[in-house]
């Protein structure tokens, strides 16, 4: 658990990435990520237009309340995810021509970018990836999600399929454990969507890093990391090579600063 505490939350990560990439000319992607970062909660009421006149029996009323609370948690994560995914799609549309996308598809083109690399260009990414697969496999085993295709090794392909399930209306909404006949806690599905957002943001971060390695940005270093005082370094201009691989971390190793 301590390992996971080293990472910023999804929305802070989204905002910080937007701050950096806007300097590199990715204004459209910046806008998607800023919206994702600014969502506090979805204003949601399961039975907002109740036409029963308040004549529900107590069990039905209690079910609606429980259903609403669980769905609220799910929708919060799903809404953030959809704006993060919008930023991802926007970036891929910017990176590749229409003919390339038509021939191979955006996600396939993205996967190809990383095929020849020895390591994914985000620090400690393997920790996030491992937890994503734990949550994904747990959700499959508990039948919180259905995945009929062969499971690929690339997590972004899985997330793409999950996203399509939602977009095409082929996604089940979780039930509160008290009203779930299989007594399956839906929290892993909710966490899976959260980690899907994390993974997608890391892909945005990595793709922009690979395309801008020689650029320099105003890093806001002392604001982005909790343990850094910029006065110790005298300059807040750093290369993309340094900032983007570490942007998702709460703290930075001072000994690692050039």
Image: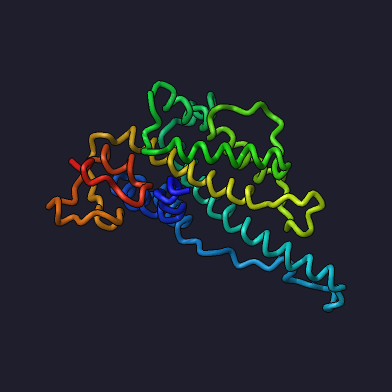
Q: Above or below — where is 171 with respect to 133?
A: below
The reply, left or right, for residue 174 in relation to residue 253 is right
Residue 164 lies, in percent from the top left, at: 64, 40
The reply, left or right, for residue 184 in relation to residue 193 is right
The residue lying furthest to the top in this view is: 116
Q: Nearer the viewer, residue 210 or 136?
A: 136
Q: Above or below — where is 163 with respect to 99?
A: below
Examine the image and state in which quarter residue 53 appears. bottom right
Residue 240 lies, in percent from the top left, at: 27, 40
Q: Residue at x 45, y 44 (%)?
A: 201
Q: Nearer the viewer, residue 173 or 2?
A: 2
Q: Residue at x 14, y 56 (%)?
A: 231
Q: Residue at x 27, y 37 (%)?
A: 241
Examine the image and state in which quarter residue 67 appears. bottom right
The reply, left or right, for residue 195 in relation to residue 69 is left
Examine the image and state in which quarter residue 145 appears. top right
Q: How many marks?
A: 0
Q: Quadrant of the C terminus?
A: top left
Residue 251 lies, in percent from the top left, at: 32, 50
Which colour assignment does the render follow? rainbow
Residue 203 lies, in percent from the top left, at: 44, 38
The reply, left or right, for residue 143 in relation to residue 85 is right
The residue lying furthest to the left in this view is: 234
The residue lying furthest to the front in this view is: 2
């Amino acid at each position: 658990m301590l390992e996971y505490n080293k990472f910023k939350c999804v929305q802070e990560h989204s905002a910080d990435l937007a701050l950096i990439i806007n300097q590199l000319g990715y204004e459209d992607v910046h806008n998607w990520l800023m919206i994702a970062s600014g969502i506090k909660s979805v204003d949601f009421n399961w039975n907002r237009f109740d036409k029963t006149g308040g004549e529900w029996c107590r069990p039905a009323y209690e079910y609606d309340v429980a259903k609403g609370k669980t769905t609220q948690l799910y929708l919060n994560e799903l809404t953030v995810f959809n704006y993060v995914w919008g930023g991802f799609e926007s970036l891929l549309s910017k990176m590749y021509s229409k003919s390339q996308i038509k021939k191979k598809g955006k996600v396939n083109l993205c996967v190809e970018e990383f095929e020849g690399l020895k390591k994914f260009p985000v620090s400690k990414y393997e920790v996030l990836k491992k937890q994503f697969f734990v949550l994904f496999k747990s959700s499959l085993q508990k039948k919180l999600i259905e995945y009929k295709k062969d499971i690929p090794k690339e997590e972004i392909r899985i997330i793409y399929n999950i996203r399509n399930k939602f977009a095409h209306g082929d996604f089940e909404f979780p039930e509160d454990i008290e009203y779930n006949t299989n007594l399956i806690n839906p929290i892993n599905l909710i966490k899976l969507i959260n980690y899907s957002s994390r993974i997608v943001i890391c892909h945005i971060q990595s793709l922009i890093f690979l395309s801008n390695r020689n650029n320099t940005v105003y890093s806001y270093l002392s604001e982005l990391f909790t343990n850094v005082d910029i006065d110790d370094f005298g300059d807040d201009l750093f290369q993309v090579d340094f900032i983007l691989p570490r942007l998702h971390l709460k703290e930075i190793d001072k000994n690692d600063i050039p």
